[in-house]
Amino acid sequence: MKLVSLLTGVALVGLFTVSDIPLKAINPALAQASAQEKKDSVTGLTVQQKIDMVTKNKGQFGGGDQLRRFFFGDLEPIGIQPGGAGMVVNLYNKANNITFSYCSTYDVVVAVKKGRITAFAPSEVK
């Protein structure tokens, strides 16, 4: 009888230490915050860190490669307009509600703005 109680106790302690189910049951807000801050397993960056990095590097060669790597499959073209070295494409990321303006001639991101922007101001995409 004591052996069964001991094994049950060890199993419960193991469940509570390994699992985050108790965390979610006790404090759902904390569990939700940790999900929003979830880091990408490949880059080790949060979504906000990725957006900040693309914004910091806008106008630099290779910024388009960074954009494609960070948001692969999540970008939807929503408009084109004169700018950059001819035309730029405005790419919308629905998951994060942000629009990137991309010049493929030089592989650069020329503008970044929150929301769905079909046409940036001409001064932003030159």
Image (cartoon, rainbow, N blue to C red):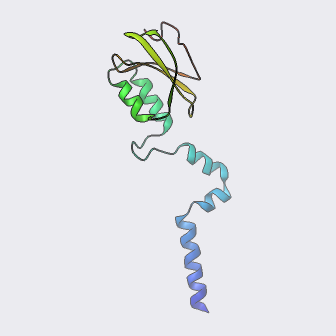
Total number of numbered labels?
Answer: 0
* Vertical relation: 32 (above or below) 75: below
* Vertical relation: 113 (above or below) 33: above
* Vertical relation: 31 (above or below) 1: above
Q: Is residue 11 left or right of residue 87?
A: right
Quarter of the figure that contains the N terminus? bottom right
Residue 60, percent from left and from top: 34, 20
Residue 121, percent from left and from top: 53, 9
Closest to the observer: 32 or 41? 41
Residue drawn where x is 59% and y is 91% of the image: 2
Residue 5, percent from left and from top: 61, 85
Quarter holding residue 6: bottom right
Residue drawn where x is 56% and y is 90% of the image: 3
Residue 27, percent from left and from top: 66, 54
Residue located farthest toward the bottom when viewing the structure as drawn: 1
Quarter holding residue 107: top left
Q: Is residue 124 left or right of residue 94?
A: left
Q: Is residue 84 left or right of residue 112?
A: left
Residue drawn where x is 59% and y is 81% of the image: 8
Closest to the observer: 50 or 69? 69
Closest to the observer: 41 or 118? 118
Quarter of the figure that contains the C terminus? top left
Residue drawn where x is 56% and y is 76% of the image: 11
